[in-house]
Image (cartoon, grey):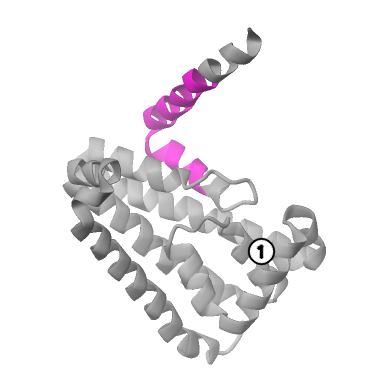
């Protein structure tokens, strides 16, 4: 009997958390963004909450975008700072070794491009892994903050703007993706542009003097 009631209880608790975060508004989004940049996954929580708040309160879309960006940068820097002090030992404790080795290898090869892509594009892999890899690799602090801030700004302001202006259309796309292939194609193109931009700025940022 208990196993039949458990799914229903989980189903009720999830909307309660979402409702609480919505009532907290920009403050709740700010703290959720900090948490999202830590090793604790939120499964794209700031992206979803930013879209919900911006769609519900159109005039304040830029405020929600700024809150998500600020919280994300703070959380990213905290993860970066801890990993920089603890080194690879911190990474071994917080992440799977198999995945960690791949991330470190990818980061050492592409550097800033990898950081831009991971911070600007929602990925199934926790972005905090790349933040921690940057810290463990002694990536320059000033460049790290600048890259994450610019990438997160583009991400959250883009989400908030689209949600505030095309909230209903976006919901239709999510519910019936095959009927709105044009929007999906546009998203793929924009994603490719972001990745290419990240790779293009790699050379310039990598040649700048370290702090």
Label 1 element class:
helix
Find residue 69 and report its image quarter.
Answer: bottom left
Q: Is residue 27 magenta?
A: yes
Q: Which residue is mark 1?
A: 132
Residue at left offset 53%, top offset 92%: 207
Which residue appears farthest toward the bottom when viewing the image?
Answer: 207
Residue 89: percent from left, percent from top:
82, 63
Q: Residue at x 49, y 47 (%)?
A: 33
Q: Decide: is 140 above or below 160.
A: below
Name the outermost residue toward the right. Answer: 89
**Helix, strand or loop: magenta stretch:** helix
Magenta span of residues = 10-33
- Between 159 and 140, the residue placed more toward the observer is 159
53 is higher (above) or lower (below) than 61? above
The residue drawn where x is 47% and y is 71% is 116
Is disc 1 surrounded by few (<14), some (14 to 19) or many (20+) residues within 10 Å?
Answer: many
Magenta residue check for 122: no
Relative to 118, 79 lies left or right: right
Image point (28%, 40%), residue name: 175
Instruction: State the image coordinates of residue 80 (x, y, percent, origin top left).
Output: 64, 63
Residue 93 sits above or below residue 150 on the image: above
- Residue 139 makes an appearance in the image: no
Residue 106 visible within the image: yes
Viewport quadrant of the N terminus: top right
Name the image quarter holding the C terminus.
bottom right
Image coords of residue 101 (percent x, y): 72, 70
């Amino acid at each position: 009997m208990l196993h039949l009631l458990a799914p229903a209880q989980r189903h009720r608790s999830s909307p309660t958390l979402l409702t609480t975060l919505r009532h907290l508004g920009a403050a709740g989004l700010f703290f959720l963004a900090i948490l999202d940049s830590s090793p604790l996954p939120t499964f794209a929580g700031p992206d979803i909450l930013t879209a919900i708040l911006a769609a519900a309160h159109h005039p304040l879309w830029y405020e929600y975008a700024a809150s998500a960006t600020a919280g994300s940068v703070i959380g990213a820097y905290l993860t970066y700072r801890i990993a920089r002090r603890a080194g690879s030992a911190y990474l071994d404790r917080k992440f799977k070794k198999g995945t960690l080795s791949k991330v470190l290898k990818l980061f050492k090869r592409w550097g800033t491009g990898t950081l831009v892509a991971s911070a600007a594009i929602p990925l199934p892999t926790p972005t905090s892994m790349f933040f921690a890899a940057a810290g463990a690799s002694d990536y320059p602090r000033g460049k790290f903050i600048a890259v994450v801030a610019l990438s997160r700004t583009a991400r959250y302001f883009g989400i908030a703007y689209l949600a505030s202006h095309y909230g209903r259309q976006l919901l239709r796309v999510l519910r019936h993706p095959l009927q709105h292939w044009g929007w999906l194609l546009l998203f793929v193109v924009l994603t490719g542009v972001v990745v290419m931009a990240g790779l293009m700025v790699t050379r310039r940022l990598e040649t700048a003097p370290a702090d």
